[in-house]
Image (tube, helix red, strand yellow):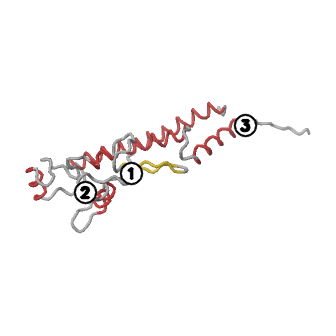
Amino acid sequence: MSDKHVKVDLSGLERYGETIRRDLSNPSGTGPIRGVFRLWAARWRTFQKLKFVKKSRGGGSWKGLAKSTKRQRRKGGKGGSGKTTILWDKFGSMLKALTPLFSSQPGQLEKPLVDGIRVGFGGPGKHPNGVVTIADIASFHDAGTTTIPARQILEGIDAVTNSAMTGDMEAACEKLAKETGTV
Protein backbone atom coordinates (compact mmCIF):
# COMPACT_ATOMS: atom_id res chain seq x y z
CA MET A 1 0.00 0.00 0.00
CA SER A 2 1.40 3.38 -0.93
CA ASP A 3 1.08 6.62 0.97
CA LYS A 4 -0.84 9.32 -0.84
CA HIS A 5 -0.31 12.96 -0.11
CA VAL A 6 -2.45 15.90 -1.02
CA LYS A 7 -0.92 19.31 -1.22
CA VAL A 8 -3.27 22.27 -0.91
CA ASP A 9 -2.19 25.83 -1.61
CA LEU A 10 -3.65 27.95 1.18
CA SER A 11 -1.79 31.14 0.31
CA GLY A 12 -4.91 32.85 -1.05
CA LEU A 13 -6.89 31.95 2.06
CA GLU A 14 -4.04 33.18 4.25
CA ARG A 15 -3.95 36.51 2.35
CA TYR A 16 -7.74 36.75 2.70
CA GLY A 17 -7.60 36.17 6.48
CA GLU A 18 -4.67 38.55 6.96
CA THR A 19 -6.40 41.29 4.96
CA ILE A 20 -9.52 40.96 7.14
CA ARG A 21 -7.47 40.92 10.38
CA ARG A 22 -5.50 44.00 9.28
CA ASP A 23 -8.68 45.86 8.26
CA LEU A 24 -10.50 45.05 11.52
CA SER A 25 -7.57 46.04 13.72
CA ASN A 26 -7.05 49.45 12.10
CA PRO A 27 -9.92 51.84 12.97
CA SER A 28 -8.57 54.50 10.61
CA GLY A 29 -8.11 52.04 7.74
CA THR A 30 -9.74 52.23 4.34
CA GLY A 31 -10.04 48.55 3.49
CA PRO A 32 -13.20 46.76 2.33
CA ILE A 33 -14.46 45.82 5.80
CA ARG A 34 -14.02 49.40 7.01
CA GLY A 35 -16.01 50.53 3.98
CA VAL A 36 -18.82 48.20 5.01
CA PHE A 37 -18.78 49.60 8.54
CA ARG A 38 -19.21 53.14 7.17
CA LEU A 39 -22.03 51.93 4.91
CA TRP A 40 -23.65 50.23 7.90
CA ALA A 41 -23.47 53.49 9.87
CA ALA A 42 -25.32 55.27 7.06
CA ARG A 43 -27.92 52.50 6.82
CA TRP A 44 -28.43 52.56 10.58
CA ARG A 45 -28.88 56.35 10.66
CA THR A 46 -31.28 56.15 7.71
CA PHE A 47 -33.41 53.62 9.57
CA GLN A 48 -33.33 55.68 12.79
CA LYS A 49 -34.18 58.91 10.95
CA LEU A 50 -37.20 57.33 9.22
CA LYS A 51 -38.45 55.97 12.56
CA PHE A 52 -37.85 59.36 14.22
CA VAL A 53 -39.87 61.20 11.56
CA LYS A 54 -42.72 58.69 11.81
CA LYS A 55 -42.84 58.79 15.62
CA SER A 56 -42.48 62.57 15.79
CA ARG A 57 -45.58 62.90 13.64
CA GLY A 58 -47.61 60.66 15.97
CA GLY A 59 -47.14 57.40 14.09
CA GLY A 60 -45.56 55.32 16.78
CA SER A 61 -45.30 54.56 20.45
CA TRP A 62 -44.32 58.02 21.70
CA LYS A 63 -46.63 59.74 24.11
CA GLY A 64 -48.26 62.76 22.48
CA LEU A 65 -47.43 66.34 23.39
CA ALA A 66 -49.18 67.97 26.30
CA LYS A 67 -52.01 70.33 25.35
CA SER A 68 -50.06 73.23 26.81
CA THR A 69 -47.07 72.43 24.59
CA LYS A 70 -49.28 72.24 21.51
CA ARG A 71 -50.84 75.61 22.33
CA GLN A 72 -47.44 77.16 22.89
CA ARG A 73 -46.08 75.83 19.59
CA ARG A 74 -49.10 76.93 17.59
CA LYS A 75 -48.62 80.45 18.88
CA GLY A 76 -44.91 80.29 18.14
CA GLY A 77 -44.03 81.10 21.76
CA LYS A 78 -40.79 80.08 23.50
CA GLY A 79 -39.04 79.09 20.31
CA GLY A 80 -42.09 77.31 18.95
CA SER A 81 -42.34 76.72 15.24
CA GLY A 82 -46.09 76.46 14.94
CA LYS A 83 -45.69 72.71 14.37
CA THR A 84 -46.82 70.11 16.86
CA THR A 85 -44.34 67.40 15.98
CA ILE A 86 -42.76 65.59 18.91
CA LEU A 87 -39.02 66.20 19.61
CA TRP A 88 -38.68 68.14 16.36
CA ASP A 89 -37.97 71.75 17.23
CA LYS A 90 -37.56 74.61 14.78
CA PHE A 91 -33.83 73.84 14.54
CA GLY A 92 -34.31 70.13 13.73
CA SER A 93 -31.25 69.39 15.87
CA MET A 94 -31.88 65.73 16.65
CA LEU A 95 -33.11 65.06 13.13
CA LYS A 96 -29.94 66.60 11.66
CA ALA A 97 -27.82 64.39 13.91
CA LEU A 98 -29.48 61.42 12.18
CA THR A 99 -28.46 62.60 8.70
CA PRO A 100 -27.49 59.36 6.95
CA LEU A 101 -24.07 60.43 5.67
CA PHE A 102 -21.71 61.41 8.45
CA SER A 103 -21.00 65.12 8.12
CA SER A 104 -19.99 66.07 11.69
CA GLN A 105 -23.40 67.62 12.39
CA PRO A 106 -23.71 68.74 16.02
CA GLY A 107 -24.84 65.72 18.02
CA GLN A 108 -23.83 63.24 15.30
CA LEU A 109 -21.51 60.45 16.41
CA GLU A 110 -19.51 58.10 14.22
CA LYS A 111 -16.38 56.62 15.73
CA PRO A 112 -14.37 53.81 14.12
CA LEU A 113 -13.39 51.13 16.64
CA VAL A 114 -11.23 48.04 16.48
CA ASP A 115 -13.60 45.41 15.03
CA GLY A 116 -16.47 47.85 14.46
CA ILE A 117 -17.93 51.32 14.50
CA ARG A 118 -19.92 53.32 17.09
CA VAL A 119 -22.84 55.33 15.76
CA GLY A 120 -25.50 57.43 17.48
CA PHE A 121 -25.82 60.70 19.33
CA GLY A 122 -22.68 62.12 20.87
CA GLY A 123 -20.01 64.76 20.88
CA PRO A 124 -19.90 68.25 22.32
CA GLY A 125 -22.45 69.81 19.93
CA LYS A 126 -24.84 71.95 21.95
CA HIS A 127 -28.44 72.66 21.09
CA PRO A 128 -28.77 76.15 19.53
CA ASN A 129 -31.08 77.31 22.36
CA GLY A 130 -29.33 75.79 25.32
CA VAL A 131 -26.37 74.77 27.34
CA VAL A 132 -26.76 70.99 27.10
CA THR A 133 -25.57 68.88 24.21
CA ILE A 134 -27.88 67.35 21.64
CA ALA A 135 -26.73 63.95 22.91
CA ASP A 136 -27.85 64.95 26.43
CA ILE A 137 -31.26 66.00 25.13
CA ALA A 138 -31.61 62.72 23.25
CA SER A 139 -30.67 60.82 26.41
CA PHE A 140 -33.18 62.76 28.58
CA HIS A 141 -35.99 62.00 26.16
CA ASP A 142 -34.96 58.41 25.54
CA ALA A 143 -34.96 57.51 29.24
CA GLY A 144 -37.56 60.03 30.40
CA THR A 145 -37.45 62.15 33.52
CA THR A 146 -39.96 63.15 36.18
CA THR A 147 -41.30 65.82 33.80
CA ILE A 148 -40.49 64.34 30.37
CA PRO A 149 -42.15 61.11 29.21
CA ALA A 150 -39.77 58.45 27.91
CA ARG A 151 -39.68 58.43 24.12
CA GLN A 152 -37.25 55.83 22.78
CA ILE A 153 -35.38 57.50 19.95
CA LEU A 154 -32.90 54.83 18.90
CA GLU A 155 -34.00 51.26 18.45
CA GLY A 156 -32.87 48.01 16.89
CA ILE A 157 -33.03 47.73 13.12
CA ASP A 158 -35.72 45.86 11.23
CA ALA A 159 -35.28 42.67 9.16
CA VAL A 160 -35.06 44.57 5.87
CA THR A 161 -32.20 46.78 7.09
CA ASN A 162 -30.48 43.78 8.69
CA SER A 163 -30.70 41.85 5.43
CA ALA A 164 -29.25 44.78 3.48
CA MET A 165 -26.38 45.05 5.95
CA THR A 166 -25.70 41.32 5.70
CA GLY A 167 -25.62 41.66 1.92
CA ASP A 168 -23.14 44.53 2.22
CA MET A 169 -20.69 42.33 4.14
CA GLU A 170 -21.20 39.34 1.86
CA ALA A 171 -20.46 41.48 -1.21
CA ALA A 172 -17.32 42.92 0.39
CA CYS A 173 -16.09 39.45 1.38
CA GLU A 174 -16.73 38.08 -2.12
CA LYS A 175 -14.82 40.98 -3.66
CA LEU A 176 -11.98 40.49 -1.18
CA ALA A 177 -11.88 36.74 -1.93
CA LYS A 178 -11.43 37.50 -5.65
CA GLU A 179 -8.76 40.12 -4.94
CA THR A 180 -6.75 37.77 -2.72
CA GLY A 181 -7.06 34.79 -5.05
CA THR A 182 -9.18 32.75 -2.66
CA VAL A 183 -11.79 31.95 -5.30
Label 1 crowd (10 A; few <14 / some 14-19 / many >=20): some
Mark earlier in primary sequence (1, 2): 1
Q: Amino acid at mark 1?
A: Gly
> Could you say which disc has been placed on residue 24 in the image?
none
> Could you say which disc has been placed on residue 130 in the image?
2
Residue tagged by mark 3?
Answer: 11
- Can you name the residue that lies furthest to the bottom here? 146
Label 2 crowd (10 A; few <14 / some 14-19 / many >=20): few
In this rendering, which labeled residue sits more in front, label 1 or label 2?
2
Depicted 93 relative to depicted 147: above or below = above
**In terms of secondary structure, where does tag 2 sit?**
loop
Residue tagged by mark 1?
Answer: 120
Q: Quadrant of residue 159?
A: top left
Front-lying residue, 142 or 138: 138
Mark earlier in primary sequence (2, 3): 3
x%, y% of residue 39? 45, 39
Q: Are marks 1 and 3 in contact (CB under 8 Å)?
A: no
Q: Amino acid at mark 2?
A: Gly
Q: Residue at x 61, y 34 (%)?
A: 177
In three-dimensional space, the C-alpha distance between marks 1 and 2, rounded to whole angstroms, equals: 20 Å
Q: Are marks 2 and 3 in contact (CB under 8 Å)?
A: no
Q: Residue at x 33, y 47 (%)?
A: 97
**In terms of secondary structure, where does tag 1 sit?**
strand
